[in-house]
Amino acid sequence: MEQIEIFEIPSPCKGVCEVNNRGYCKGCYRSRDERFTWGQLTDQQKRAVVILCQQRYQRYLKKKTSSKTVTKDNKEQQQLDF
């Protein structure tokens, strides 16, 4: 049994409360519906939302890392262009 299963699931809110262009919070990575219905969700549903948020965060990090690599490669290429 994981520790998350023993205790009440707290809101993952980080107090940022800004959304990206896809409607996900930039702080906690929850959708609008997930944010507004958090208080009515069961613990099992909250765990599922937390897992989704973690997956969204990992995708964000992967995209951010890959875009930095592309930008770096483009800058290096531009320096080689005459």
Image: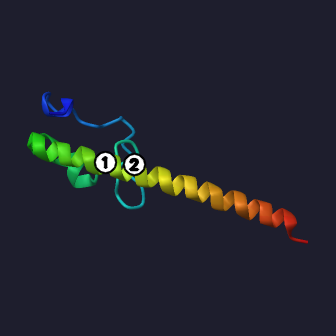
Q: What residue is pinned by disc 1?
A: 53
- Residue displayed at 19% across by 33% down: 2
Mark 1 Cα shell of 10 Å, populated few (<14), some (14-19), many (≥20): many
Which kind of residue does numbered mark 2 sit on? Tyr
Residue 42 in view: yes
Q: Return the x and y of residue 45 as percentages of the image width and height.
A: 13, 47
Q: What residue is pinned by disc 2?
A: 57
Work out which quarter of the rendered image holds the C terminus and state it: bottom right
Which kind of residue does numbered mark 1 sit on? Cys
- Residue displayed at 39% across by 39% down: 16
Asked if residue 14 lies left or right of residue 66, the reply is left
Farthest front residue in view: 1
Total marks in image: 2
Farthest bottom residue in view: 82
Mark 2–mark 1 CB contact (< 8 Å): yes
Q: Return the x and y of residue 7 as percentages of the image width and height.
A: 14, 27
- Residue displayed at 34% across by 51% down: 55
Asked if residue 68 lies left or right of residue 31, the reply is right
Question: Which of 38/81 is in front?
Answer: 81
Mark 2 Cα shell of 10 Å, populated few (<14), some (14-19), many (≥20): some
Which label sits on residue 25?
none
Question: Which of 43/5 is in front?
Answer: 5
- Residue displayed at 62% across by 55% down: 68
Q: Return the x and y of residue 15 as percentages of the image width and height.
A: 36, 35
Q: Which colour scheme is used?
A: rainbow
State how far apart marks 2 and 1 are (Cα). 6 Å
Work out which quarter of the rendered image holds the N terminus and state it: top left
Asked if residue 69 lies left or right of residue 53, the reply is right
- Quarter of the rendering containing residue 14: top left
